[in-house]
């Protein structure tokens, strides 16, 4: 009897390159390339950096994914609260199917299983294209792809796009921790300084970070009926308000009866960081890629960057934010408590309105 083999290492999905068509090989080989944070390389495609394996998935879903009017697509930059909002979206739009809170799928499945990534999970093997026709509407998918790289069927259909953004400093710190968890055994950790330099230069998965945000911000202004723009920090501050906003946008507002019976609070409790991170499936479970579920649950806090970035380092992303967002109408407003760094300094740019 053969000894059971251990699951593949968590890095496999990020390093493994599947069979490519000659056309795709030629395209990828022609792109600007830099050393990746986890994977060997990042390639600049349509203005944004992608790992080789993500490139394969991006090209496949651009060619083959056909969005339906009833589809819901969650879009984020990496480590911007994706796992949390996946759980919230699933619990929100599928709530009529799972009325018993003790038997909810989120208790036994990781949110990334219930709301898969198009370019990472759905289109992983271009030799065997997925059959998505049997999925009950509304179909829920997610992506880190920038607006310029979305499949045309998403851009030209009435499907709903939910965009979640996060403060660049917090997103960077979370991404740096996450990437170091995924690096191959024996390769050592990526230094904070090296990763910070790459992030500020825009060389990170789906970076430049700021351009990614602006692409979807502009789309939310152009097509507010099809795209909604949410800020992680504001949702953390007033989750019930933004959950109701999401429900209205997605065409499934809470009824007076649901409000009376505390359905809003029930969804937020179920999907809270404290609850999700303490479930057995998220403490010890493993995704099909080999990645441990607990890698997606670190802190989920606002302002964690203060524990890692020096005052001098902070000037760089703040300066980029001011430059990139100027004239866009984007604004950030946080509480004073969340703005003070370890030297007690309050970063004034966060109070600015970029118009």
Image (cartoon, grey):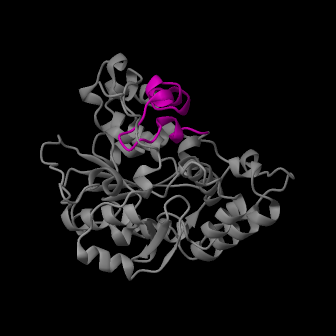
User: Is residue 153 positioned above or below 247 on the image?
Assistant: below
Image quarter of the C terminus: bottom right
Report whether 42 appears left or right of 256. right
Q: Which residue is drawn at 21% across and 63% down?
A: 157
Q: Nearer the viewer, residue 9 or 304?
A: 9
Image quarter of the N terminus: top left
Q: Nearer the viewer, residue 316 or 17?
A: 17
Q: Nearer the viewer, residue 165 or 177?
A: 177
Q: Position of residue 22 (x, y in %)?
A: 24, 76
Task: Check residue 238 for magenta coloring.
Answer: no
Task: Check residue 271 for magenta coloring.
Answer: yes
User: Is residue 175 positioned above or below 325 on the image?
Assistant: above
Residue 89 visible (yes or no) = no
Q: Quadrant of residue 156?
A: bottom left
Q: Quadrant of residue 229?
A: bottom left
Report whether 59 appears left or right of 302. left
The range drawn in magenta is 269-298
Q: Residue at x 48, y 28 (%)?
A: 284
């Amino acid at each position: 009897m053969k000894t059971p083999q251990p699951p593949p290492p968590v890095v496999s999905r990020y390093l493994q390159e599947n069979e490519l068509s000659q056309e795709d090989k030629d395209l990828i080989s022609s792109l600007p390339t830099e050393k990746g944070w986890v994977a060997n390389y990042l390639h600049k495609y349509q203005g944004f950096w992608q790992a080789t394996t993500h490139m394969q998935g991006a090209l496949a879903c651009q060619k083959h994914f056909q969005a339906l009017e009833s589809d819901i697509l969650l879009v984020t930059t990496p480590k911007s609260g994706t796992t949390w909002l996946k759980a919230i979206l699933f619990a929100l739009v599928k709530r009529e199917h799972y009325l018993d809170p003790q038997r909810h799928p989120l208790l036994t499945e990781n949110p990334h299983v219930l709301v898969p990534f198009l370019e990472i999970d759905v289109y992983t093997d271009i030799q065997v294209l997925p059959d998505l026709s049997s999925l009950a509407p509304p179909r829920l998918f997610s992506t880190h792809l920038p607006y310029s790289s979305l499949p045309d069927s998403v851009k030209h259909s009435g499907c709903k796009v939910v965009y979640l953004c996060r403060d660049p400093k917090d997103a960077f710190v979370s991404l740096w921790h996450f990437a170091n968890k995924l690096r191959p055994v024996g390769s050592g950790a990526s230094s904070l300084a090296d990763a910070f330099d790459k992030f500020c230069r825009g060389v990170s998965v789906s970076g430049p970070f700021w351009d990614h945000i602006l692409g979807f911000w502009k789309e939310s202004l152009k097509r507010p009926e099809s795209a909604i723009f949410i800020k992680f920090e504001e949702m953390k501050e007033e989750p019930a308000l933004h959950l109701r906003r999401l429900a209205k946008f997605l065409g499934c507002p809470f009824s007076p009866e649901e409000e009376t019976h505390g359905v809003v609070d029930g969804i937020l409790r179920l999907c809270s960081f404290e609850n999700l991170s303490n479930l057995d499936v998220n403490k010890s479970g493993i995704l099909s890629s080999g990645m441990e579920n607990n890698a997606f649950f670190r802190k989920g806090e606002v302002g964690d960057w203060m524990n890692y970035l020096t005052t001098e380092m902070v000037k760089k992303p703040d300066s980029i934010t001011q430059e990139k967002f100027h004239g866009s109408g984007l604004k950030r407003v946080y509480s004073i408590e969340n703005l003070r760094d370890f030297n007690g300094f309050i970063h004034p740019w966060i109070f600015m309105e970029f118009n």
